[in-house]
Image (cartoon, grey):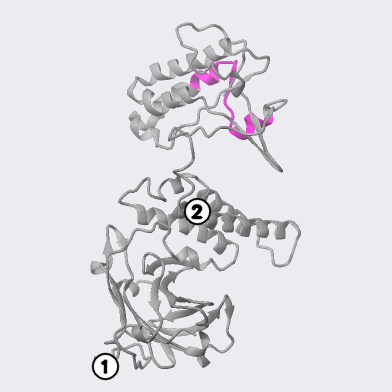
Amino acid sequence: MKASSAARSTSGFSAMAMAFPPLYKPWQVQVAPNGITGLFRDHHLSDLVGFVYSRMDAKAAAADLHARMRHLGETVQTNQPLTICLFLDGENAWEYYPGNGRAFLREFYGRIQDDQDFRALTATEAIAAAGGIPATAGIFPASWINANFDVWIGHAEDVAAWELLWDAREAYARAFEARKQGRADAPTETALLEARESLLAAEGSDWCWWFGPEHSTANDAEFDALYRKHLTAIYLSLGQVAPEELAKPIKRRPEHALQLAPTSLLNVTVDGRDTSYFEWLGAGLYSPERRGGSMHGRVFYLHELRYGFEQERFCVRIDPFSEALGELEDPEFRITIGGAEELTIVVNLQRSHVQGFAVEKDLVCLLNPKLVAEAAFERVLEVAIHRDQFNLKGQSKLRLGVALWHGGLPVDVLPAEGFLDVHLGEDHFAWPPE
């Protein structure tokens, strides 16, 4: 809101927001080599809207807010119009108002419209209308939680969330620059707009409110998945492949699961069926508690994971929830095996059969995957990859993770924590380290 400093007198209000009169205008925060222009909220007035006026009559509340803002025009000494910013807290204030605040907002904006000393502006308009924006070398963290940003940064989950956002933003920036330069590989204007919408959705700091140890909710998993869905959509809009990391939950809540280490070497026939009772009997097992394919409103597609070694192949079996998987058109399995090098087997299903598969080694796709691997699906997915594709030098274990993708988005992973440790050595019925 812009209010003239020559506003008429309104008595009866304390000057709670008068301690920092220079804050009623835009400021340039200069952090070498860059700067950003921002606005400071009036804490007291914003909190009245957020937490108090919902309990008042709409006309009385609107009149009170209007009068308090006019009072600022009288008491703040300046030769420039005031920029009074009402920025609400993270909670949705309007659900606590009768009629979602409709009557209050109509009353308030009606008063602003009728008062020639006020103009309602967006933040962009207020900054553009300001003259002589002052600069400062830094600002104090104004969070009401410990006056710092620990809730949003620092923890491993927070770091992971911000780094994934950074990578997606950089991908968007490169695509934007390519479009600006008129390059042939640049995305369309429509694609850039779609990517930007997803980027803006992912940039809100409240995503990181829920990462880390400070806060939790019954919907942590859904919130986590939605954040990663926004980031994935950026890449898809730009015509790029989303990073594998976006298939893995950021919130590292341990999943209750039965885990068994391998008890013998295997002899697997890769046909997607239970060829015999003994085929996978000595395999390692990861079997989480996922009853009936869904829990707490979330659909699960992956039931359990088996793995183990033959003399010359590493074998993986994935048991899906058949009914849930059948609802997905052309799903894609991504099996990642990490060691000195990262190996990913991407298996595409079509009409419940393997349509094709690829083998990626350190992000490079091998030309003839059938020479080094096998894959088959009927009731289960079975995959075997030859020993010579692994670099075991200096390794005591491998890391195994499985992700199911659909429509370019990750829909389920095993294990939920991201990776399972697969120990090497004869004591573990595995190949010895090199």
Residues in magenta? Answer: 110-128
Where does label 2 land, which residue?
159
Q: Amino acid at mark 2?
A: Val
Asked whether residue 377 appears in the rendered view, the answer is no
Q: Residue at x 40, y 19 (%)?
A: 61
Q: Relative to the observer, which residue lies in front, 188 or 333?
A: 333
Residue 220 rendering spot, x and y as whole percentages = 35, 53
| Label ID, residue 37 | none
Rendering quarter of residue 368: bottom right
From the viewer's perspective, is the residue at label 2 or at label 1 nearer? 2
Q: Relative to the observer, which residue lies in front, 218 or 361?
A: 361
Q: Are marks 2 and 1 in contact (CB under 8 Å)?
A: no
Where does label 1 land, which residue?
276
The quarter of the rendered structure image containing the N terminus is top right
Q: Relative to the observer, which residue lies in front, 1 or 77?
A: 77
Rendering quarter of residue 18: top right
